[in-house]
Amino acid sequence: MPWLGGFNLLPYRQRNARLARRRCLRDWAVAACVGATGVLALAGWQAFETARLDARRASAEQALAQLDAPLAEHTKLLRARDESRANAARATSLSEPLAHLLDLLEALSFEPGDGVVLRQLRQREYETELLATSNSDLTSAEWLERLSAVRGVKGVEVRNLQRPPVHGSAQADKAVSALVEFNARLRWGDPPSKAARVTGTAAARIAKSESSGGTK
């Protein structure tokens, strides 16, 4: 093969290789700049959002701090209202037996009670026990029926119906033996169950403890 000397017959290949390397370096540089710009933009956005959230949180905390006193006063008023309602309900519950007794005494004051003599009256929270004598069973039944119409009476029950013991003269014994002694119960309502009483007592204790704790 003849020698052609030191001339490069394909000079465009080296030029193309140099251009390709430069283009690759340029692309890398552009990509690096774009990536750095994106990272900086994301960091700036996060910093802006963090600052905005911090400002909002600070504003909310300041608003809540301003509401501490009104909220405490509102809570105090609610507790006072609940205590007032509980005290009113307790006072009503305690006054009901007295109101029932007054209604019964008023009815007895206007009740003629012909043939019926009231011997004993015992008032309880939800009932009234009556011990009386009458000249007949019919008279006793009519008298109790009239008492059942007293305001607040839920029912009337006759527990004992018997002749009273006799002693003394024959005339007195004869008069007493004609009488009928009976023990009746006027029911003003049904007492609460044991569970309800326990629940009410526990609620009252909790309210009292909260009240004492709030006043310290």
Image (tube, grey):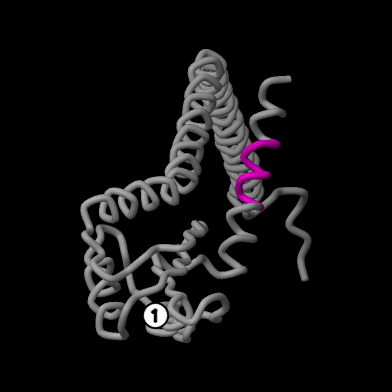
Q: Quadrant of the C terminus?
A: top right
Q: Crowding at label 1, few (<14), some or many (≥20) Cα neighbours within 10 Å?
A: many
Residue span colored magenta = 202-209
Q: In this view of the protein, can residue 56 be seen by the observer?
A: no
Quarter of the rendering containing residue 128: bottom left
Name the residue type under label 1: Leu
* Number of numbered markers: 1
Q: Main secondary structure of the magenta part?
A: helix
Residue at 67% across, 25% down: 214
Q: Is residue 102 above or below residue 169?
A: above
In this view, the residue in front, 103 or 14, is: 103
In this view, the residue in front, 30 or 11, is: 30
In this view, the residue in front, 5 or 183, is: 183
Quarter of the rendering containing residue 211: top right
Residue at 29% across, 55% down: 108
Residue located beneath label 1 in the image = 179
Expressed as whole percent of the image width and height from the top left, the position of residue 154 reads: 32, 69
Q: In this view of the protein, can residue 201 be seen by the observer?
A: yes
Q: Is residue 107 above or below residue 180?
A: above
- Is residue 109 inside the magenta stretch? no
Q: Quadrant of the N terminus?
A: bottom right
